[in-house]
Image (cartoon, helix red, strand yellow):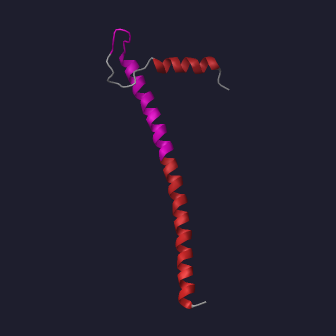
Amino acid sequence: MISPQCVLMCLQTLDGLPNCVFDASGPMLQYSMQARAGGFFAKLAELSAVGALTGSATSILASAGEEFFCLHACRVFVQAWVDWQGW
């Protein structure tokens, strides 16, 4: 289990990074090249995780929809066949 101090330290470290690599340094915040590189990789990881979750959800929904469509199409075809045969 991760200790609360470790989580707090990680959050404080991420707060010190720029949100965008091109954020301007101001009088209260001075960004070094290491901070900008860290901000770039933190944003890269964040957006990659969002993309992976979105892609997974889309894939799951698409496969569920495809299965539903195939079952519905088979039922319609069988019903049409039965009606045509006059059973």
Can you give x and y, in whole percent of width and height, for residue 82 in the image?
57, 85
Q: How many marks?
A: 0
Q: Residue furthest right?
A: 1
Q: Main secondary structure of the magenta part?
A: helix
Seen at 51% across and 43% down, the residue is 53
Q: Is residue 8 magenta?
A: no
User: Which quadrant holds residue 27?
Assistant: top left
Seen at 50% across and 57% down, the residue is 62
Q: In the picture, which quadrant includes the N terminus?
A: top right
- Residue toward you, 49 or 58: 58
Position above or below: 55 against 35 = below
Position above or below: 40 against 54 = above
Q: Is residue 33 magenta?
A: yes
Can you give x and y, in whole percent of width and height, for residue 58 in the image?
49, 51
Q: In the picture, which quadrant includes the C terminus?
A: bottom right
Position above or below: 14 against 53 = above
User: Which quadrant holds residue 41?
Assistant: top left
Magenta residues? 25-54
Q: Residue furthest top?
A: 27
User: Which quadrant holds residue 83?
Assistant: bottom right
Can you give x and y, in whole percent of width and height, for residue 68 in the image?
55, 64
Can you give x and y, in whole percent of width and height, for residue 48 in the image?
45, 38
- Residue toward you, 72 or 19: 72
Q: Is residue 59 left or right of residue 31?
A: right
Q: Is residue 38 left or right of residue 27?
A: right
